[in-house]
Amino acid sequence: MPQTTEDILAAIESDNIAIISDMLKNLITTHKLNEGGEQKQLYERYKQSVEGVPVLTKDYENWEKVHKFLPNDFYGDIVDLKTGYMGNAIIVEVDKDAEGRDAQMDFLIAFGKEENTTDQNSELVKTAAISGKSYRLLFVREGEAKIMNLEPWETVVYYDASMLMPEAAMRYFTIEEQEGDGMQRRHRVEWYDDKMITYYRESTGGDYVKDTSQPREGDFAGTGEQPHFFDGVPIVEFLNNKEGLAEPRKAINLIDAYDDIMSSAASEVEQLRMSYMWLRGMGMVVDPELEDQMRQTGILPIPEGGDAGFIGKDLGGAAGFVETIMGEIRRNIYSFSKSIDLSNDMGGDMRVIGWQVALLRLEMSSQVTERKFTKSYRDQYRMLTTFWAGNDRTDIDPLTLGYVFTRKFPKDVDMEIDTLVKGMGVLPLETVYSLMSFIENPKELAEKFLEERPEMASIDQALTDAESSLE
């Protein structure tokens, strides 16, 4: 019977190490057998590893024949396209009316550079696309807040009954340690609640005990626990979509079918299975001597009265059927994954607007992910700003923060400039700028424009008020 969050927290609060050990065993085993195991398998598929792609380990009864194993990296292509399209710089900005905005923006920019957030945010998008969700850990080092992405197959967040508020989180991983004359892999567990981190290790007997080798320094050194200094559970979950499904998850069976058909067709060609040799009146034994002679000369000696020939397979209808079904499978793979096949020949003269229409499925998927990520960024920065304020770093109201996601979208700049000119003075400046694909931060550019053209400020404010009244 699955353990509820209430059961899990009650076990932790019991302070009974035997109960806690049984609970951790159950949680880790359950995660590995279910969500965590599937996420790890999907990651192996993305890497095109032998254990991750079914066609690479497909078993055949007769190994004397040629059997090609040809994986087609649809999974990686779909994930990388989503990452390249959506996983670009995510701009965190303070509302223009916030007091002390300039200093706060400088602080956020410095934090972003220090933590390399552009790369880390891109990896969040990629991991979520691969496995359906990704995680980020907030931690403190030398008095400064830091961020680190975690592997989803090693991380679990436990929510309250409403599934809205995280109550606890577990991160588990394996390390090699000396045991007798050899090395053994043992689990390590980090358990997070809203105040503390508790460390556990797997003993030689397979039980879990508090790891008193952690933390290594500070006031709590050697106690097996320490405060994490954040107001809340410092592991933040980032969902690819509400269901936590990987981007190509619905098309996995189609991808495997495509691999199987491609591999079988290539095997037919490689071993000349499209035709079979027949012999008549040969009356000979194919022994090693004859085989060596045939390898050297490429000639099969035929005795008097003997004959040889080939029977060809009539694949005329089959070839067309195979081509048709492979084309349909390929189209469905990209359609069900909300992606686009960039290898399609669009005729060379397809206008940018045509590409934008073709990218609608990918854009819709990205918008879903963006909404889920925005919620997670709010949770992340709520804890970060509370930490910064409590340690006299900066005082930022998290409700004044906005998050701008940029896209790698095909641009028809001439047409967009024409739209921009027509929209000026008719719509609020920020609204017009937001329609331009080549403008990454409409709010910042609108503010800069109004600083340089103060006579436009009153007009723009009136348009903004009019737009707001229609909402």
Image (tube, rainbow, N blue to C red):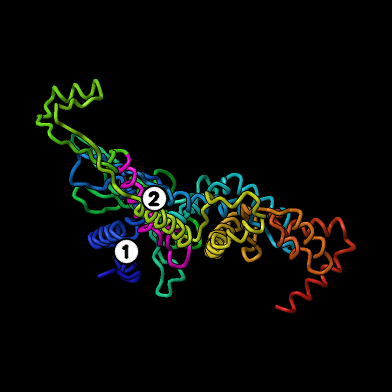
* Relative horizontal placement of residue 264, taking residue 180 as reference (left or right): right
The residue indicated by pointer 1 is 12
Where is residue 96 shown, x and y percent of the image?
74, 62
Q: Earlier in the sequence, mark 2 or mark 1?
A: 1
Mark 2–mark 1 contact, CB under 8 Å? no
Crowding at mark 2 (Cα within 10 Å: few <14, some 14-19, many 20+): many
* Relative horizontal placement of residue 455, taking residue 322 as reference (left or right): right
* Relative horizontal placement of residue 357, taking residue 274 as reference (left or right): right
Task: Return the residue nearer the eye: 237 or 424.
Answer: 424
Q: Is residue 294 magenta?
A: no
Where is residue 227 shown, x and y percent of the image?
44, 55
Q: Tell me which corner region of the image, top left, top right, bottom left or bottom right, holds residue 249.
A: bottom left
Of helix, strand and loop, which one carries label 1?
helix
Of helix, strand and loop, which one carries label 2?
helix
Looking at this view, name the residue that lies furthest to the right. Answer: 455
Q: Tell me which corner region of the image, top left, top right, bottom left or bottom right, holds residue 269.
A: top left
Image mark for residue 249: none
* Relative horizontal placement of residue 308, taking residue 260 as reference (left or right): left
Where is residue 383 shown, x and y percent of the image?
54, 60
Q: Is residue 190 visible?
A: no
Residue type marked 1: Ile
Q: Tell me which corner region of the image, top left, top right, bottom left or bottom right, holds residue 421.
A: bottom right
Q: Is residue 251 magenta?
A: yes
Identify the residue shown where x is 33% and y is 46%: 263
Task: Please state the extent of the stretch shown in magenta in the rendering.
Answer: 241-269
Identify the residue shown where x is 40% and y is 74%: 161
Q: CA distance from mark 2 to mark 1?
A: 31 Å
Residue type marked 2: Tyr
Locate the N terminus by quadrant.
bottom left
